[in-house]
Amino acid sequence: METILVVDDEKNYLVVLEALLSEEGYEVLTTPNPLEALEIINNVDLDLVITDMKMPKMDGIIFLERVKEKKPELPVIMMTAYGTIEKAVEAMKKGAFDYITKPFENEELKLNIRKAINMYHLLKENRRLTYALHSKYQFGNIIGKSKKMQFIFEMIKKVAATKTTVLITGESGTGKELVAKAIHYNSPRRDRPFVSVNCGALADTLLESELFGHEKGSFTGAISMRKGRFELADGGTLFLDEVNNMSPALQVKLLRVLQEREFERVGGTKTIKVDVRIIAASNRDLKESIKMGTFREDLYYRLNVVHIHLPPLRERKDDIPLLVAHFLKKYTSEIGKGEIKVSEEAFRRIYEYPWPGNIRELENAIERAVVLCEHGIIKPYHLPEALQKKNLYFDLKDLSSDIKLPQVLENIEAELIRQALVKTNYVQAKAAKLLGITKSLLQYKIKKYNLSP
């Protein structure tokens, strides 16, 4: 149960607010004495403080300052019958979450309270996850607390100590190179080179020279001898990304190196022996490529000694808060901004989006939001366009063992209600009329889907 402290020298307001907020399911503590309130704040785990601005024993602004000294993140809503623009601005500058005047509208107060508490909880969760990033939820630069990622962490630990060839599969942007680096830097080869090459980024002839090197004069432009990636990685690890794009001719040469641990440079006759661990990656199903005749089956079995498959981000949504906290910390530090929070609605968009570009797309979205955010809170309009307007259409692929038709229908209903509330500026009577339902049913749905702003 969430706990709210109300501080006001007018006892009638204490009685009214205690009754109103208790009906909403909050645990409510009240006191007319700001000094007593400070003692409560010291000793009770609160979610929100609501305080009057003008009190005889302590001015509301001074009380706010004392609260922020003790618990800087605890949200405080100021209320007063003597409101002025100057006082409102001063309260907000001192760290008040919001400012309302007496007499207040009950619905407006309840919405402000819900917003303040949701923001506080999100901030606490981000703090917890930021700490968690330095413990069991991080392996190198790979982040995840989901069961799938914990299993992958265990696989990395086991395979890192060996010289075994590893095949990493997964969609683009899932972090295959990070896994390869984690294997290398936790292996006995950690002090030797980690060399990577993208097999899909180079033409066939250039890729051969890149992998095996070439002798002077072996082709036009070969003005000197050049060592290839295999030689550069001797004693260490060679990461072959997008190995599925390698031509059949190069696949034969790679197979020989895997079998014999030796090769010749392009245009050369000298056999060069190397001790290189191979980690390969593919964003395609290599078994399908074998069926299509574009990938050698014998090479597949040479590469696929240990197989690590990285799930797409949409299948590991429990990791999204961790990743958001990590990228916020990374880019606020790089850009030189202070602490930035994510609003509840922005976080909901981030969580519900399917992320076809996976972690790479999420990282780009957070970097963009940090750059555009000006007041310390990321709102939906700071996010990429794809996240600003929620898509209400679903494919059958959205139905999995975790997501069934009733949940999809609930997602659609929640989004329609959210849009109606936004369109009517959260006036519930208007939103209910727009949706064609009763106000009481709308209030039930708002609580069910946690749609308060």
Image (spheres, rainbow, N blue to C red):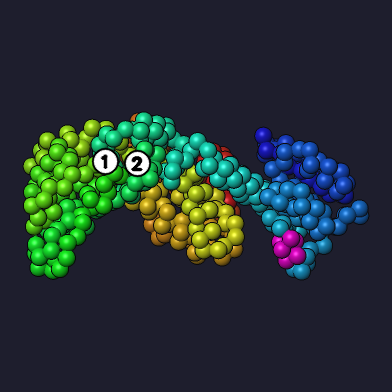
Residue at 46% over, 59% down = 367
Residue 435 visible (yes or no):
no
The x and y percentages for residue 322 are 49, 44
From which residue to which does the magenta span run? 89-94
Contact, CB < 8 Å: mark 2 with mark 1?
A: yes
Q: Residues within 10 Å of mark 1 (few under 14, many from 20)?
A: many
* In the foreground, 41 or 51: 41
Determine whether 338 is above or below 24 in the image: below
The x and y percentages for residue 306 are 27, 32
> Within the magenta stretch, is there residue 90?
yes
The x and y percentages for residue 125 are 58, 43
Residue type indicated by callout 1: Arg
Residue beneath disc 1: 277
Q: Which mark is residue 302?
A: none
Residue at 12% over, 47% down = 271
Left or right of residue 88, residue 39 in this image:
right
* In the foreground, 220 or 308: 220
Q: Earlier in the sequence, mark 2 or mark 1?
A: 2
* In the foreground, 17 or 254: 254
Residue at 42% over, 54% down = 363
The span from disc 2 to disc 1 (Cα, nearest Å) is 9 Å
Residue type indicated by callout 2: Arg
Callout 2 secondary element: loop
Q: Going by the picture, which residue comes out furthest to the front? A: 270
> Within the magenta stretch, is there residue 70?
no
Residue beneath disc 2: 189
Determine whether 416 is above or below 188 in the image: below
Determine whether 48 is above or below 91 in the image: above
Callout 1 secondary element: strand
Quadrant in the rendering for residue 398:
top left
Q: Main secondary structure of the magenta part?
A: helix
